[in-house]
């Protein structure tokens, strides 16, 4: 199973990422979505898109027409995949940046992997279980080298991460 992991779009999804998500089975957005259009642009093969709220997913920052959808989004989700459970949180509630992975691992010890956003930094910490994964920013704000996301290949015995960073778009290229 191919699972697209993304976060921190802040109202804009890089169209090249949307194209790649279409080749995945499921998409999971780890918060700071920005508006309903971002989620509508995610079209994995199954049509299944899961999303959580981030610290910027608040009514004052979302278009009024999208606020009903915003209110349905949870702060955390779990997804059973072949070979284990993926948990998604935004990460803003971990006060200590230095201990963030340790704290997340302690809070979600039953998971095989934990997806989080918030920092906009692409990270694949698979040194211990559960893995702690941040796909970076899939939009255009604070991408630190270009928009990014991760494809998780989940099989019954083996999981594999495929981080993807794209070159930044210029305004003309959008």
Image: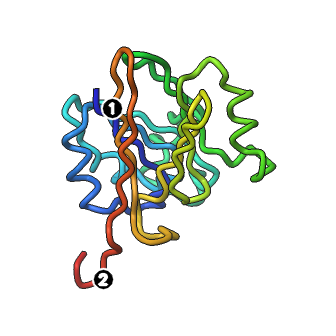
Q: Position of residue 144 (x, y in %)?
A: 50, 70
Which mark is drawn over residue 23?
none
Residue placed under numbered mark 1 in the picture = 153
**In terms of image quadrants, where is residue 126?**
top right
- What is the crowding at mark 2: few (fewer than 14 residues within 10 Å), some, or many (at least 20)? few
Residue with the most extreme right position: 96
Q: In the image, is 121 to the left or to the right of 65?
A: right
Q: Position of residue 27 (x, y in %)?
A: 34, 37
Q: Nearer the viewer, residue 171 or 145?
A: 145
**In terms of image quadrants, where is residue 101?**
top right
The colour mode here is rainbow
Which mark is drawn over residue 171?
2
Residue with the most extreme bottom position: 172
**Residue appearing at x 43%, y 61% in the figure:** 11
**Residue appearing at x 30%, y 83% in the figure:** 171
170 versus 23 height, above or below: below
In the picture, the quarter occupied by the N terminus is: top left
- Mark 1: which secondary structure? strand
Spatial CA distance of label 2 from label 1 is 33 Å
Q: Nearer the viewer, residue 71 or 119?
A: 119
**Residue appearing at x 34%, y 34% in the figure:** 3
């Amino acid at each position: 199973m191919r699972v697209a992991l993304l976060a921190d779009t802040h109202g804009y999804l890089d169209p090249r990422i949307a194209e790649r998500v279409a080749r995945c089975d499921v998409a999971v957005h780890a918060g700071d979505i920005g508006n309903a259009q971002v989620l509508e642009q995610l079209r994995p093969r199954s049509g299944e898109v899961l999303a959580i709220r981030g610290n910027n997913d608040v009514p004052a920052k979302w278009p009024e027409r999208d606020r009903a959808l915003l209110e349905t989004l949870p702060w955390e989700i779990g997804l059973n995949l072949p070979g284990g459970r993926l948990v998604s949180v935004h990460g803003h509630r971990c006060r200590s940046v230095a201990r963030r992975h340790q704290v997340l691992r302690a809070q979600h010890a039953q998971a095989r992997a934990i997806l989080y956003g918030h920092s906009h930094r692409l990270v694949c910490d698979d040194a211990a279980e559960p893995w702690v994964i941040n796909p970076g920013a899939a939009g255009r704000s604070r991408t630190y080298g270009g928009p990014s996301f991760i494809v998780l290949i989940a099989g019954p015995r083996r999981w594999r991460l495929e981080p993807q960073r794209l070159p930044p778009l210029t305004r003309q290229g959008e």
